Amino acid sequence: MEQVAGLNVRGERSGLLSVVVPAYNEEKSLALFHERLRDVVDKIPMETEIIYVNDGSTDNTLTVMQRLRNGDQRVGIVSLSRNFGKEIASTAGLDHTEGDAVILMDADLQHPPKMIPVFLEHWRAGHDVVYARRESRDGESKFKKTLVRATFALEGITSFTVAPLKIATYVGLIAAIGAFIHAAIIVYRTLAYGDPVAGFPSLIVVISFLYYRRLRSFLQKQISPPGSNFHCIWLTSPLSQHD
């Protein structure tokens, strides 16, 4: 049987596994995380690279990463110049991956490495995206639990449908048409009756006209699937970096 990139001779998904771990001020937990991650990936029949992203940490997180790299050649480091936040750090890590499958994980052990084989099992079954959700959130306030549920609901809507983008398109188009009509009325009143062009209505026209393009552009960025150029296994997380 002919072997294809990312597949073994039996046609099963294989190849290189990339683990991306963004971290911000995680010097105390990083070594323990890496120990548990190493125990898991050592047993996986795939080559592995581990990319830690230092998201502008102010403690010794980068020093710990360098120490881990010295002891494990699978480790790569990406160090950002300042704290850009989880999403940018994750993207920086993804930009430096070479794997056939990519796993995003938190460095604080909220995402247990022992779940990686489960994700790979689903990936090998043909799923391009595998996403994890906690079964329970003991010890967290009701407000935080409600906020998390709302976030998951929003992600569920925007990740698998373009309906919000269509709605935004129609709403923005109506706003733009309204701006044109409003502008026409102002021009007519000025030419027919000599009314001065009021500053505030003119400003509202401009804002309404620009609203359509700005809203549509924003939602396109939110709805476009992250990592669309990768076969991704998604464990939502802070990640770490590559040299």
Image (cartoon, helix red, strand yellow):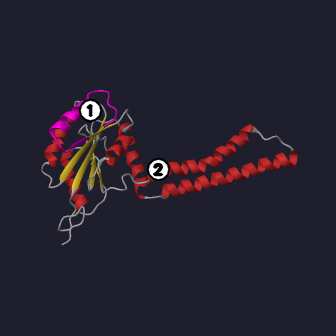
Locate residue 170 relative to residue 144 in the image: left or right.
Answer: right
The single residue placed furthest to the front in the displayed view is 243
Q: Which residues are magenta?
A: 54-76
In percent of width and height, residue 180 lies at 70, 52
Query: Can residue 136 be seen in this snapshot?
Result: no
Residue drawn at (28%, 35%), measured in percent from left and top?
139
Locate residue 107 relative to residue 181 in the image: left or right.
Answer: left
Residue drawn at (20%, 71%), measured in percent from left and top?
2
Mark 2 or mark 1, whichever is nearer to me: 1
Q: Residues within 10 Å of mark 2 (few under 14, many from 20)?
A: few
Q: CA distance from mark 2 to mark 1?
A: 30 Å
Dot placed on the residue nearer the N-terminal end, 2 or 1: 1
Residue drawn at (17%, 55%), measured in percent from left and top?
46
**Which amino acid type corresponds to the residue marked 1 in the rendered image?**
Leu
Q: Is residue 71 magenta?
A: yes
Residue topped by disc 2: 221
Q: Secondary structure at mark 2?
A: helix
Q: The C terminus lies in which quarter of the figure?
A: top left
47 and 27: which one is in front? 47
Residue topped by disc 1: 62
